[in-house]
Image (tube, helix red, strand yellow):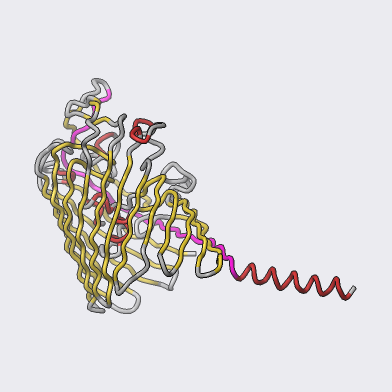
């Protein structure tokens, strides 16, 4: 009897140790509110009858529910296991959903992230699976809108920073060394759901390279990022008259970006510059029906296209609970090869957040875009109020 009790006590103590070395966390965000959108002007759209692209009037406005504005609504599981000698295993599964109707977003169960990996304080971490790119992560920390708030965020002008997530990616992050951190990733197929760019052979898949170096010391944050998309053998482009044209797979969209922020405690200043060539990564859609909503396109190839993008922003801490922030974005395209026009785009935005607690906040924002998607005279206005709760 005593041996049985002793064995039970030992087993209980070992179980406690195992539980202490392994952790799993359930977490999530719910974001919802009321928003307003207005679009004015004409834009290229594919005529369903003829199949050709022509300019159509896309003007209109709406008021309705919005969701995922300050942060995308989501739930997830993440955990780690201590493997000894400073080595740990980790995983993260994150699913996005639309708080206005309960549907999954991104057409996947774990569309936001699905990764497993190893980490060590001495050499860094390596993760495998679907996850955000380096440019998206690094530049979001400098953007006053934190890569959120629809067209207000830095991803409108710097498309590789528009919360770009890649399938089949191996991502390495170095440890912090004297304020520096390096990260690099390679995707064997950036979008497994795209049948036109997915196949058995390596070259039949659209592959991606993402890398970045940042320096963070005290109030200063400087980030340099690079993103590249290698087209597949099955890739195609859409001509100006709406025809599908086989793509020369030597066309390689690239984006280089340099961003910096400086925190003066009450006021935080931010600036960014980027150059995009031969295409666009993740376009910021217009909230309208039909093909005109996707003017920029996602993973769009445009041989010879070039654009210079600029962002200036600031965040003012009004008190311990509220922040006022804003930005100006300017994008200057070299030609009309991407969207059919080459007007210079400007986007002015302002936002406000108020923390009711550490987990609950209210927000309001407004944004105005002129010559949106480089279409001369096309204007986009967006705004709304809402709340976000973390759990």
Note whether 89 is above or below 231 in the view shown.
Answer: below
What is the quadrant of residue 368 in the picture?
Answer: bottom left
Q: Is residue 38 magenta?
A: yes
Residue 241 image offset from top left, x and y in percent: 18, 26
Residue at 80% over, 71% down: 7
Residue 171 image offset from top left, x and y in percent: 38, 54
240 relative position to 84: left or right: left
Foreground residue among 274 and 313: 274
Quadrant of the image containing the N terminus? bottom right
Kindly tell me whether residue 152 is visible in this rendering. Answer: no
Foreground residue among 376 and 307: 307
Residue at 35% over, 48% down: 186
Note whether 215 is above or below 128 in the view shown.
Answer: below
Q: Is residue 121 magenta?
A: no
Task: Tell me where the magenta segment starts and ends, as one range.
Answer: 21-48
Residue 5 image offset from top left, x and y in percent: 84, 73
């Amino acid at each position: 009897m005593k041996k049985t009790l002793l064995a039970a006590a030992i087993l209980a103590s070992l179980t406690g140790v195992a539980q202490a070395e392994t952790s799993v966390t359930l977490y999530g965000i719910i974001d919802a509110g009321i928003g307003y959108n207005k679009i004015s002007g004409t834009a290229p759209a594919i005529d369903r009858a003829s199949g050709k692209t022509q300019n159509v009037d896309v003007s209109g406005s709406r008021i309705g529910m919005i969701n995922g504005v300050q942060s995308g609504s989501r739930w997830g599981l993440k955990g780690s296991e201590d493997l000894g000698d400073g080595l740990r295993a980790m995983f993260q599964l994150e699913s996005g959903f639309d708080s206005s109707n309960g549907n999954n977003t991104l057409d996947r169960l774990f569309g936001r992230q699905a990764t497993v990996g190893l980490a060590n304080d001495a050499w860094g971490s390596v993760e495998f699976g679907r996850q955000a790119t380096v440019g998206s992560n690094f530049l979001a920390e400098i953007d006053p809108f934190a890569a959120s708030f629809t067209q207000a965020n830095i991803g409108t002008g710097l498309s590789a920073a528009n919360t770009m997530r890649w399938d089949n990616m191996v991502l390495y992050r170095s440890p912090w060394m004297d304020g520096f951190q390096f990260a690099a990733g390679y995707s064997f197929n950036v979008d497994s759901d795209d049948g036109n760019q997915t196949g058995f052979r390596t070259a039949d898949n659209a592959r991606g390279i993402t890398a970045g170096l940042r320096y963070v010391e005290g109030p200063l944050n400087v980030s340099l990022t690079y993103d590249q998309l290698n087209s597949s053998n099955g890739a195609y482009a859409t001509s100006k008259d709406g025809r599908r044209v086989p793509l020369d797979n030597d066309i390689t969209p690239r984006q280089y970006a340099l961003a910096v922020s400086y925190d003066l405690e009450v006021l935080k200043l931010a600036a960014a510059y980027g150059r995009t060539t031969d295409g666009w990564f993740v376009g910021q859609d217009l909230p309208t029906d039909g093909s005109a909503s996707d003017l920029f396109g996602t993973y769009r190839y445009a041989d010879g296209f070039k654009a210079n993008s600029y962002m200036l922003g600031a965040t003012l801490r009004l008190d311990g609970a509220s922040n006022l922030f804003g930005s100006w974005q300017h994008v200057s395209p070299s030609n009309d090869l991407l969207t059919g026009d080459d007007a210079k785009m400007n986007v002015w935005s302002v936002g406000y957040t108020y923390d009711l607690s550490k987990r609950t906040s209210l927000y309001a924002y407004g944004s105005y875009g002129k010559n949106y998607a480089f279409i001369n005279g096309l204007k986009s206005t967006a705004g709304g109020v809402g709340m976000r709760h973390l759990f």
